[in-house]
Image (spheres, coloured by chain):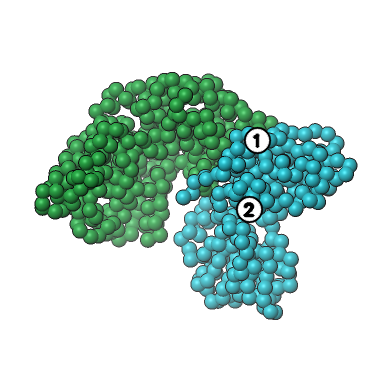
Amino acid sequence: MKPVYFDHAATTPVDPRVFEAMTPFFCERFGNPSEPHRLGREARSAVDQARARVAALLGAGENEIVFTAGGTEADNLALFGSLARLQPGHLVVSAVEHPAVMEAARALNGRGWDVDYVPVDGDGVVDREAYRAAFRDDTRLVSVMTANNVVGTVQPVAELARIAHQKGALFHTDAVQAVGSLPVDVDELGVDMLSLSGHKLHGPKGVGALYVRRGTRLQPLLHGGGQERRLRSGTENVPGIVGLGVAMTLACEAMPEVRPRLERLRDRLVAGVLARVPEVTLLGHPTDRLPGNAAFAVRYVEGESLLLRLDARGFTVSSGSACAAGSDEPSPVVQALGVRPEDAHGSLRVSLGRENTEEEVDAFLDALPPIVDELRRMSPLYAKR
Amino acid sequence: MKSTQYSEKTLEHFRNPRNVGTLEGEDVAVGRVGNPVCGDMMDIYIRVGDDDTIRDIKFQTFGCGSAVATSSMITELVRGMKLDEALKVSRGDVADALDGLPPIKMHCSNLAADALHEAIKNWRAGVGPEDAKKQPGGAACHPIPAEVAEVEIENLDAYEGKGLYKRLDDLAELADERVVVLDTGDAAAQLAMDLTDHTGRVVLMTSGKEPSVSPAVRSALRLSDVKVLAEAQPLELLGEGELERIRVHDLNEDEEYELTADAFVVLE
């Protein structure tokens, strides 16, 4: 059987149609969009077209889109850009944010900002009561992700944004995992800023965007030639931006067909794993989750071992174990759900994408139980349980 | 990149681990190291012959790829060895036999030699398998076996009153000195932070990747002026009469170096 890629939350293959659309902008239509000559105008019009596509798909205006070098830069621009111009005050983020938000918040903390990390419940949903209680008179910004990259839980962003606005704070959401998988409309969500990334939706790496609601004042991270309405200096990554525009268009066009199909595949995979492997827990919300995300805690085995064994059998998956992440502690997101650290080490994330099939899911369901069994027979914890 | 670049040999041992299992009998001893909370735990079983050789060896391991591979490799390395020889087999030998381990794994998932040494120690002390498998405990994850975490500096006491402090009543005593505080938990970290009011040169030395402190202290520490020196194990105090330097083992690079210090604080 061909290798099976089940790690779409990490990154996705570039769609050949996206690649084709990008190709001319490397060697032939390579102009600098800031130049008034023909080559420059061609490049400018390609960037403008991509911007119009991205804006339309988010329900935003064209001048509300800032292209960046990816999701991490978009998150940093949102947090630092909106806060750096203010006197230090208070910032609220959820306990399950992506490191791009988490570490930016920590860095702001080092510059005098107070940060509150709002806990989540066992399904990974932000605790509403703790969220409301976190606000202070000087709360300037809230950042809560649209959907979680590790356990897939979708947050009630519209409700959280409404509360933030009542309290006079701006609201940013990292929608890197959601855009292209779920309908995302900036007005329905009511957010002031929203980050997205190209390579999570079958576009290229190294390109992303930040939606910035008209009237929201930001300071740039990068100073220079004043591109992107002065918010992101540097010659535009024209092929990347073109690729992002096409990739997002294709993902959103295909969503009515892909989303229910992925949800069926995901539910088949979850039900199969829970039925065939004992002592496994589904992580994240049972229904309010990304269409392709299935995350588990597999007791008595260590996640990197599981990942490597599955890899040897041709299945590419991910784990939040400390070893797999090259860190000291297992996934902080999994632990935020209340999973014990020894069980969090056995976390397994399967993230499906539009090219996956039912045959692949079934092959995975056949491959997993003997691998878990073998690792458990090797584990001193399993014997003594 | 923090990724896991394993050698082919490591992967091969991981995929086909040798000598998985347990042993039973009067002539069997077990060494257990690690802690499931940290993501690594292993048991090494040895059967010892009358001639003091390892007649048989098995392992059980909960852990990542390198934890499994090092367990498997050590069973091959020491089978048939005299116990004294086997005690000389180090973490470095195991890593070398696997054609090296990624740096991040050298410290955290390379416990097999420790487990073997523990088994031999238990055999010699007459500790039975059931007693040996009682959890070593220990809340902090990465100073691994308890005895490594404990200070084993031979000449420690010789410097008492000459730069070594086991308690500190007046912090101002160390004003503007170069102070190294050994990580022994929250109290040590708190003391280190308090010392920054008196001197700008405070180092908190830990054998782990991070100090073994509670989350609240950890975040306070991050914001403080205390410099954390991670994966560092003090070996020896040096200096004519007064403390001048500390010889330190860098556990990540497996190298030794000397650190200049006027005061070394090891809270009791």
The amino acid sitting under disc 1 is Pro
Tell me: residue A362, above or below residue B25. above
Q: Residue at x 71, y 61 (%)?
A: B152
Residue nearest the viewer, comparing A103 with A132: A103
Which image quarter: residue A354? top left
Which image quarter: residue A2? top left
x, y percent for residue B83: 81, 48
Residue nearest the viewer, comparing B97 with A149: B97
Q: Which residue corresponds to mark 1?
A: B17
Which image quarter: residue A199? top left
* Labels in figure, total: 2
**Within-10-Å neighbours for mark 1: few <14, some 14–19, many 20+:** some
The amino acid sitting under disc 2 is Pro
Q: Which residue corresponds to mark 2?
A: B143
* Sequence-wise first label, 2 or 1: 1
Q: In this view, which residue lies farthest toward the left?
A: A37
Chain of residue at mark 1? B
Left/right of residue B167 with respect to residue B28 in the rendered view: left
Q: Residue at x 88, y 44 (%)?
A: B51
Q: Colour of chain A?
A: green
